[in-house]
Amino acid sequence: LERFFLHDLFTAIELNKRFEPAYEGLWMELEKGREYYEARSCLSDMMNLFGEKPKFYSALCRLYSFDDYLEKATEVCKAAIEKDPKHADNYVHLAVSLRDQEGGAQAQKLLAGAAKRFPASETVQTTTGSLYLGNKDYAIAYKYYKQATKADPTSTRAWQGLANTAFELQKNEEALAAYGKACEIDRKMTKDLR
């Protein structure tokens, strides 16, 4: 079925080279199928045809970070932030790329700023918490995970992070409650609880 859908998208593009929804559908299907190189190529074609739109930069930022092209991800994510400073995920992808290039302090600074700017972004809050947790700075990680649970009360990773950091800080009752909440959302979380 997916093959037929992709074939239809290619046919639509052949019939009308300037039909943007067909390109968007193709890019999204390629990304969903983890065909990141092809998705990036499609986005590059779209930028040439339809202009350098912020959503194209954000998508390229995400795709380069998936394939661990760290230098290119850093470059594209910086451009994505310039084009669309209100898109929280661009900051996350840039910070992860910087961290992976031995720029932990720079990534930490970037994420801390993004966490202040986007308190309602679970992704930003959780990633920031994870970075501090990796540095064993449990008190600061705890603060970000707590905010992440407020940003998205259905996020398993936010509750799990809150539980782990609360446990490290010997806030055992809060840790147990957070583990319970994570288990309600996803039964696979019982391993951490045990």
Image (spheres, rainbow, N blue to C red):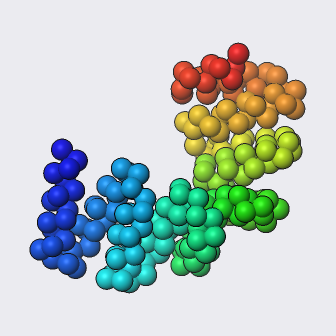
From the viewer's perspective, tell me whether residue 164 is left or right of residue 30.
Answer: right
Can residue 24 be seen?
yes
From the viewer's perspective, tell me whether residue 129 is left or right of residue 9.
Answer: right
* Residue occupying the point 63% across, 59% down: 92
x, y percent for residue 56: 43, 72
Quick check: 140 above or below 45? above
Quarter that holds the C terminus: top right
x, y percent for residue 88: 59, 62
Quarter that holds the N terminus: top left
**Residue 157 occupies quadrant:** top right
* Residue occupying the point 43% across, 81% down: 52
**Residue 101 occupies quadrant:** bottom right
Can residue 85 be seen?
no
x, y percent for residue 95: 68, 61
* Residue occupying the point 79% across, 35% down: 165
x, y percent for residue 40: 42, 67
Q: Residue furthest top?
A: 194
Q: Name the foreground residue: 180 vs 187.
A: 187
Quick check: 72 above or below 93? below
Quick check: 123 above or below 181? below
* Residue occupying the point 35% across, 69% down: 42
From the viewer's perspective, tell me whether residue 19 is left or right of residue 94.
Answer: left
